[in-house]
Image (cartoon, rainbow, N blue to C red):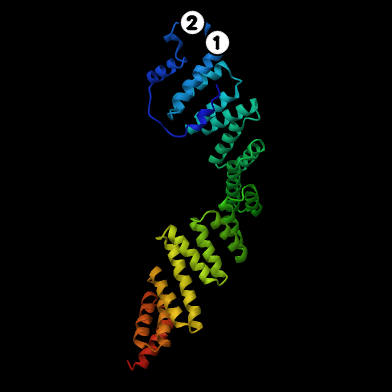
Amino acid sequence: ENLEPLMKHQSGGAEADAEQFDKIADSKGCGDSSKGPKSPRMESQEGKVRQLTRRADFFASRARYADALPLVDQALLLEPNRPELHLGRGQCLMQLDKLEEALTSFEAALRLDSQCISAQRNKALLLAKQRRWHDAILSFREALSVEPTQELRMELARCLTEHAIQLKASGHGDVQLFHEAIQACDSYAPAFFQLGVCYSEVNDSIKAKEMYRKAVQLHPGYVEALNNLGVACRELGEWEHAIEAYGMALKVNQNCSKTRENMAISLLQLGCRHLQRKELKEASKALKQGLSFNSRNADLYFNLGVLYAEKEKWDQAKVNYELASNFDPRHANAHNNLGVIHRRLGNP
C-alpha cells in the first residue's frame, strides 16, 4: 500500500488503542493473522506489508506518529526498495521533528523514484523548515519541474525571499533574488515588500512606493507594507496618500504606536502646508486630528498656536505654545512666540 495518507494527517484525532484498531482491521480483513484461522505461511509478504501500512496509516490518522513509525520500519525490512515506504517513514519522522532522519528517508525515496513528487515536496518543505534556503530553492525547483502547482511556486518565492533577506543580513545582499521570487510567483506579497525596502534604502521613493502598493494590493492587511507605503508617500510630499495608507494600517491594528506616530506626523505636515497657504480651516482640522493620534506631539501644539495667532486669538495661541513648551522644553520657537504673546498682552 502507498503511504501517501501519512502526509495528509497533520492534526490529531480521537485516541484509539491497539485493540480498537484490531477490531476495525479485522472487519476489513487485514487484522492480526494470529486472530484468525489463517496460517502465517499462507500470508504473502505483500499481505504483511499491506497490513503494516494500514496499521501505520491508522495511527498516523490520529497523529500517533511514534506508533506509526515502527510499523513502517517493519514494512521496510520486508520491502526496502519501495519508495513509498521511505516516503511514509520520512513523513512520520518529520512530524516527530526528527528532521535529519526524515531528510535521509525522503532522499532514499527519491533515489528509488526520482519522479516521486511527494518525496521531493516534503524534502523541500523540510529544508525550508531548517532555514536551509539555498538547498530548499533547488529542491522546490526540482519539484516544480514535475508538478508546476501554484502552491509550489509560492513556496519557491518564499524561499527565494528568505534567502535574499538572509544574505542581506550577512552583508551579501542580492536584489536579484527578490526579482526571481516575483518571477516564481507574482502573487507573493513579501517579495514586493522587500524589494520596496531595497528601493527605500537607496532613496528611490517612487519605485519603493510602487512595490509597497503592489504588496498591499496582494495582501490588504499587510501592516508593514502599509506603514512603509505611508513613509514613501511622505518622502514624495504626498501627505494625503500617506494618511490614507496609515489609516488602512490602523484598521488592521489600531493600537500600533508606530503607525499612530506616523499618522500624527503626516497630519502635522498636511496642517503646515495648509497654514502656509492660509487655509486655516483645513489646517485646524488636520492639526487637531493629529493630536488624536499623538497628544504629546509638541509641534502639533506649536502650529495650532501659530494658527490661533494668525486669527488673533491670543489666549488660545498662548495655551498651545505653553503645551508645546511643556512637551518639549527645548522648543525654542514655542518659547519665543510665547514671549511675544506675553508682551502683546502686557504681561511682565
| Dot 2 amino acid type | Ser
Say how many tags the image has: 2
Cβ atoms at labels 2 and 1 below 8 Å apart: no
Residue at image x 66%, y 35%?
146
Q: CA distance from mark 2 to mark 1?
A: 10 Å
Q: Position of residue 157 (x, y in %)?
A: 60, 47
Q: Position of residue 299 (x, y in %)?
A: 43, 76
Q: Position of residue 179 (x, y in %)?
A: 65, 52
Where the N terminus falls, by quadrant? top right
| Dot 1 amino acid type | Ser
Q: Which residue is mark 1?
A: 44
Secondary element at tag 2:
loop
Q: Which mark is residue 250?
A: none
Q: Which callout, 2 or 1, points at the residue further toward the start of the chain?
A: 2
Instruction: Kindly tell me whether residue 137 is visible in this rendering.
Output: yes
Q: Position of residue 38 (x, y in %)?
A: 47, 6
Q: Which mark is residue 39?
A: 2
Above or below — where is 112 with respect to 243? above
Above or below — where is 227 with respect to 335? above
Please tell me which residue lies in front, 169 or 188: 188
Residue 136: which quarter of the image? top right
Residue 153: which quarter of the image? top right
Secondary element at tag 1:
loop
Residue at image x 55%, y 37%?
126
Q: Is residue 275 left or right of residue 122?
A: left
